[in-house]
Image: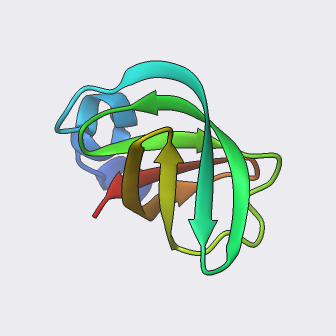
Amino acid sequence: MPTQANNQNSADRQPASCRRQLPRYRRLKSGEVTFGKAATSCRVLNLSDAGAALQFQTTYGLPGTFELRLGSFTRNCRAAWATDTTIGVYFV
């Protein structure tokens, strides 16, 4: 008898890079995330027109929405997924 995990469609088992609508390009740039009056630095691991992966010392305490600044590039972000040190966002 198949388990629930075996019943997932194949798209759910593909890596995120295969599910993205737009390709992401590797970037190792320093950035800043702001929310309210607070700010914290981050490293941009990859970037596309639709979103990014950001690395922090810790993602603990980050809100679900914030602003990302990379020099003159500024985008409002919403969290899509997170680990202890990395967060994937899409631009809103």
Quadrant in the picture for residue 48: top left
Residue 52 in view in this figure: yes
The number of numbered discs placed on residues in the rendered structure image is 0
Quadrant location, the N terminus: bottom left
For image coordinates 30% across by 52% down, the residue present is 8
Q: Residue furthest bottom?
A: 36
Residue 45, above or below 50? above
Give left or right: position of 63 versus 70: right
Q: Nearer the viewer, residue 33 or 58?
A: 33
Q: Residue furthest left?
A: 21
Q: Nearer the viewer, residue 49 or 36?
A: 36
Residue 1 in view in this figure: no
For image coordinates 70% across by 63% down, the residue present is 39
Residue 58, above or below 11? below
Percent from the top left, x then y, of residue 79?
47, 63
What colour-coding does the image apply? rainbow
Quadrant location, the C terminus: bottom left
